[in-house]
Image: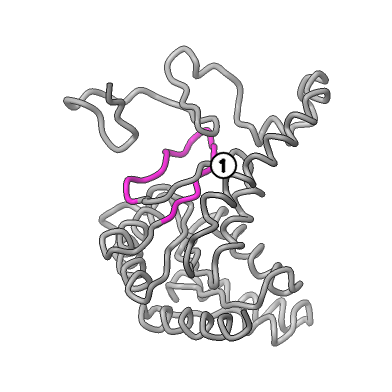
Amino acid sequence: MTIEGPWGTPNGAEHPQEKQRGPVVLRRSRLAEPTTTDQRLLDSRGPSDWVHTDPWRVLRIQAEFVEGFGALAEVPRAVTVFGSARTPREHPEYAAGMELGAALAAIGCAVITGGGPGTMEAVNRGASEAGGLSIGLGIELPFEQGLNPWVDLGVNFRYFFARKTMFIKYAQAFICLPGGFGTMDELFESLTLVQTKKVTKFPVVLFGKSYWQGLYDWVRDSMLATGKIGEKEMGLLHLTDDIDDAVSIVEEAYQAWEATH
């Protein structure tokens, strides 16, 4: 029996509303089951009996790391690309994402995204259609779709922190396409990890000057100007509109990384 995902339904039938809980899909009468795993973990107002299940949560968290490490252990050099799930396919940012994915595949880089629709789908699609390795790391959310159809290797996570570890551990560079709160979270966590030397120094590319220029200027004119960060930290950010420039930054960073490994 074939069950279509959020990308289509048999014979044009309306797709039922659904909720994902890790690898489990809930529909119809099961939709009433409460929230997501992360919500239940972080909600201190919940029933007190959850306190007694925390040791089991630790095992589940451990399992997510084991699954992620096992699935991605043989990944070649890779670039993590962040971006919006809300970008429509007809938007120029979608076309840019496809072009970027293809260009990264052409230099032998796997691409790692959040595996969702929008810009993430575009990057996965561009890489996959160009013959590269297209990786998607999904997350259990009450309002997002599942992994997009251009993900060749996909892993679904319940917990954001386990997923973020995989984004960072297996990449030699980050590229941020225009995005919302999730993209900002991933951008600044990446910068913090590089700044504090939790990860090897590698570049963070802000792709799309018209979108990122205001943020870049604020970081320079507020954070840097008042001494909250230094010139070295400011130098971690690269602002560009050019695919070739972004790929060149990635290539140079990889050569520097390879020389020390």
Q: Residue 220's spot in the image, x, y percent? A: 65, 81
* Of 21 and 68, the residue lying toward us: 68
Quadrant holding the C terminus:
bottom right
Residue at label 1? 157
Name the image colouring: one colour
Amino acid marked by disc 1 = Phe
Dominant SS in magenta: loop
**Quadrant housing residue 9:** top left
- In the structure shown, which secondary structural element does the residue marked by tag 1 occupy? strand
Is 144 magenta? The answer is: yes
Q: Residue 216's spot in the image, x, y percent? A: 57, 76
**Quadrant housing residue 200:** bottom right
Horizontally, residue 226 falls left or right of residue 180, namely right
Residue depicted at 43% across the width and 63% down the height: 111
Quadrant holding the N terminus:
top left
Q: Residue 34's spot in the image, x, y percent? A: 61, 22
Magenta-colored span: 135-150
